[in-house]
């Protein structure tokens, strides 16, 4: 059963050349340390983190450069086959789209009605991490990631191991090495 169909027009950003088609790119990414601190503080205070998404985030960014795109296949104007479109807003795929979205979000972060947002419930996934809240605390793991890796490299048929190395291999002591815990 099909619930809904979606389509998205995407720019071929891989064709863009730095210094000609765009000047600056940027994608805001949280450092792992910051994520750990956020999760630790939330767990220690007993907070339940929520997640949300901004619908069509990159389409909300305004671009400063002049960007022209070909007419999308199937939507060409029969009268103007050689014409192109000048973009007024960012499209997914443009090198400058993440920066344009960040600039717009930064300017209007406190205006909750500016963007259509969807509440997505209690935080369960964040940047590849799985977060599980329970009465005993917050548990962060990557079980889904470890299941997906063998599939990604066509090793889904491999025999799983509890320990990824031999457990009865004798290791030599490094007499000159530094002791570790």
Image (cartoon, rainbow, N blue to C red):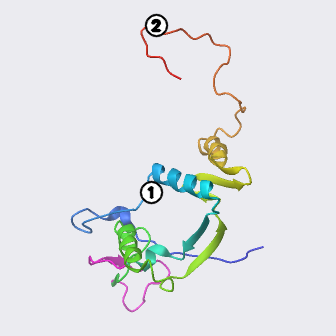
Residue 9 visible in the current orientation = no
N-term mark: 2 or 1: 1
> Badge 1 is on which residue?
30
Q: Would you identify the image quadrant in which residue 55 lies?
A: bottom right
Q: Residue at 63% across / 42% down in the picture? A: 146
In the displayed structure, 119 sits above or below 31; it is below
Task: Please rate how many residues cluster around mark 1, counting C-alpha atoms within 10 Å: few if below 14, some from 14 to 19, many from 20.
Answer: few
72 within the magenta span:
yes
> Badge 2 is on which residue?
175
Q: Residue furthest right?
A: 1
Give the quadrant of the N terminus.
bottom right
Q: Which residue lies furthest to the front in this view?
A: 45
Residue 107 visible in the current orientation = yes
Q: Residue at 24% across / 66% down in the picture? A: 23
The magenta segment is 62-82
56 within the magenta span:
no
Q: Does dot 1 land on a helix, a strand or a loop?
A: loop
Of circles 2 and 1, which is in front?
A: 2
**Residue 5 location in percent, x, y?**
65, 77
- Magenta: predominant secondary structure element? loop
In the displayed structure, 27 sits above or below 83; it is above
**Residue 8 location in percent, x, y?**
52, 75
In the displayed structure, 60 sits above or below 162; it is below
**Residue 70 location in percent, x, y?**
37, 77
Q: Residue at 50% across / 81% down in the picture? A: 74
């Amino acid at each position: 059963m099909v619930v809904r169909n979606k389509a998205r027009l995407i720019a071929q950003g891989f064709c863009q050349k730095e210094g000609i088609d765009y000047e600056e790119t940027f994608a805001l990414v949280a450092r792992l340390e910051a994520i750990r601190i956020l999760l630790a503080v939330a767990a220690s205070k007993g907070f339940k983190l929520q997640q949300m998404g901004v619908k069509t985030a990159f389409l909300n960014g305004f671009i400063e450069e002049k960007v022209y795109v070909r007419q999308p296949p199937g939507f060409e104007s029969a009268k103007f086959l050689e014409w192109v479109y000048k973009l007024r807003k960012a499209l997914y795929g443009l090198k400058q789209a993440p920066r344009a979205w960040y600039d717009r979000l930064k300017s209007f972060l406190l205006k909750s009605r500016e963007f259509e947002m969807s509440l997505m419930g209690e935080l369960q996934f964040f940047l590849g991490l799985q977060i599980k809240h329970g009465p005993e605390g917050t548990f962060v793991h990557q079980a889904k990631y470890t299941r997906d890796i063998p599939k990604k490299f066509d090793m889904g048929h491999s025999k799983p191991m509890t320990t990824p190395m031999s457990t009865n291999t004798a290791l030599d002591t490094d007499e000159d090495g530094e002791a570790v815990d």
